[in-house]
C-alpha cells in the first residue's frame, strides 16, 4: 500500500551544511518499528516536551551513567575532570529540535566529532549550569538570557577521564548563532525525529577490554552522533518515555 510508505523530502540543513533527508511520519504509527524511529515529531510538541521535562527532571533519582554500565572495569581509576554540556531544545517545523555542533578538525581532542556545546567547569563558574551557559556563549554566541534551564540529566562518566553534567534548556528567545572560529566547524538544529534509537550500541577495543560505543546516525549522509553525546541523547529519550537503546 503506497499510502503507508514514508515520504522523503530533500531539505537544506544538517551538521556541516549537508543537505538532509527528512522522513515524513506514517499515517498510522501505532507499534510500527519505523514509527519508533521517526515518530517523535508526531508524538509531542515542544510545549508538551518541555512540560514533561519540567515534571520529570527534578523528581529523578540521580544515576551516574557511563562506560562502567557496560563493564565495571571500565570505570576511570583516577580523578575525573568535571565538565558540563548544554542540551538545548526548541520547536521546529519537524517537531522538537536539539542543538548540536561539529568540532573543528584541527582540535586535539575529539576533532570533527558531533557534540553538544560545552566544556570544562572552571573555578570561576558558579556551578555546572553556569559553565554550560558560558561555554555555549563562547562556542556559538548563544546569550545566556536566551535559555530557560529546565534541569539536569544524569551525570555521565567516560573511561577517558571526564564526568559530564548535561544541562537541559529551552530556547526562550531567538538568537543568531555564530560558530567560534577554530573551535566549532558547524552548528545545526537537528530534529529529534531524525535520531535513530534502538540499534545504536556496538563495542570497540579498550586495552584488553571492550568499551561500549553508542551511535545514533542521522537520517541524512552527515556525520554520526556517537560516544557520550549519543549516550546523553539516549538518556533524554529515556526521560521523555520515547524509544531508546537502554
Image (tube, rainbow, N blue to C red):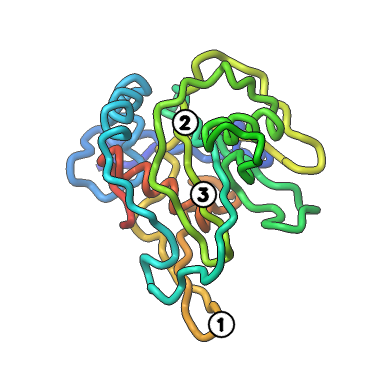
Q: Residue at x 38, y 49 (%)?
A: 234
Nearest the eye: 206 or 215: 206
Identify which residue, 240 or 57, lies in the foreground: 57
Residue 64 relative to residue 85: left or right: left
Pick whichever of labels 1 and 2 is earlier in the sequence.
2
Position of residue 159 relative to residue 20, above or below, is: below
Q: Looking at the image, do the residues carrying marks 3 and 2 touch, with CB atoms under 8 Å apart?
A: no
Task: Name the residue located 45 percent from the left edge and 60 percent from the top edge.
Answer: 214
Cβ–Cβ below 8 Å for labels 3 and 1? no
Disc ID at residue 3: none
Q: Answer left or right for 107 relative to 197.
A: right
Residue bearing mark 2 = 97
Q: Nearer the viewer, mark 3 or mark 1?
A: 3
Q: Mark 3 or mark 2: which is in front?
A: 3
Which residue is identified by label 1?
207
Q: Residue at coordinates 35% horizontally, 25% vertically from top-left?
A: 50
Residue 194 pos. (x, y %): 44, 41
x and y, in percent, of residue 30 in the image: 18, 40
Q: What secondary structure is found at the residue carrying circle 3?
A: strand
Q: Label 2's element?
A: strand
Residue shown at 43% from the left, 60% from the top: 66
Q: Position of residue 158 (x, y in %)?
A: 51, 61
**Rounded to the nearest whole Å, what is the CA distance between mark 1 and mark 2?**
37 Å
Q: Which residue is mark 3?
A: 164
Contact? badges 1 and 2 (CB < 8 Å): no
- Residue 170 visible (yes or no): yes
Please tell me which of labels 3 and 2 falls first in the chain.
2
Classify 221 as above or below 3.
Answer: below
> Could you say which quadrant of the image residue 46 lies in?
top left
Which part of the image, by quadrant, shows the N terminus? Answer: top left
Amino acid at each position: 500500500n503506497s499510502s503507508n510508505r514514508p515520504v522523503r523530502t530533500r531539505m537544506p540543513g544538517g551538521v556541516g551544511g549537508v543537505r538532509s533527508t527528512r522522513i515524513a511520519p506514517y499515517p498510522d504509527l501505532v507499534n510500527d518499528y519505523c514509527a519508533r524511529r521517526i515518530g517523535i515529531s508526531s508524538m509531542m510538541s515542544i510545549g508538551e516536551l518541555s512540560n514533561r521535562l519540567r515534571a520529570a527532571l527534578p523528581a529523578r533519582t540521580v544515576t551516574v551513567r557511563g562506560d562502567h554500565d557496560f563493564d565495571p572495569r571500565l570505570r576511570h581509576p583516577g580523578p575525573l575532570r568535571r565538565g558540563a554540556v548544554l542540551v538545548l531544545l526548541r520547536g521546529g517545523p519537524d517537531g522538537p529540535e536539539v542543538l548540536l555542533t561539529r568540532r573543528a578538525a584541527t582540535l586535539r581532542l575529539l576533532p570533527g566529532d558531533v557534540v553538544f556545546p560545552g566544556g570544562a567547569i572552571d573555578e570561576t563558574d558558579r556551578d555546572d549550569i553556569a559553565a554550560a551557559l558560558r561555554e555555549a556563549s563562547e562556542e556559538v554566541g548563544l546569550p545566556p538570557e536566551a535559555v530557560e534551564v529546565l534541569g539536569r540529566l544524569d551525570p555521565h562518566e567516560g573511561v577517558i577521564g571526564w564526568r559530564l553534567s548535561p544541562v537541559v534548556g529551552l530556547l526562550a528567545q531567538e538568537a543568531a548563532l555564530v560558530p567560534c572560529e577554530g573551535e566549532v566547524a558547524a552548528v545545526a538544529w537537528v530534529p529529534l525525529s531524525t535520531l535513530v534509537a534502538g540499534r545504536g550500541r556496538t563495542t570497540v577495543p579498550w586495552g584488553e577490554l571492550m568499551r561500549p560505543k553508542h551511535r545514533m546516525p542521522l537520517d541524512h549522509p552527515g556525520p554520526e552522533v556517537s560516544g557520550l553525546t549519543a549516550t546523553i541523547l539516549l538518556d533524554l529519550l529515556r526521560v521523555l518515555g520515547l524509544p531508546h537503546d537502554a
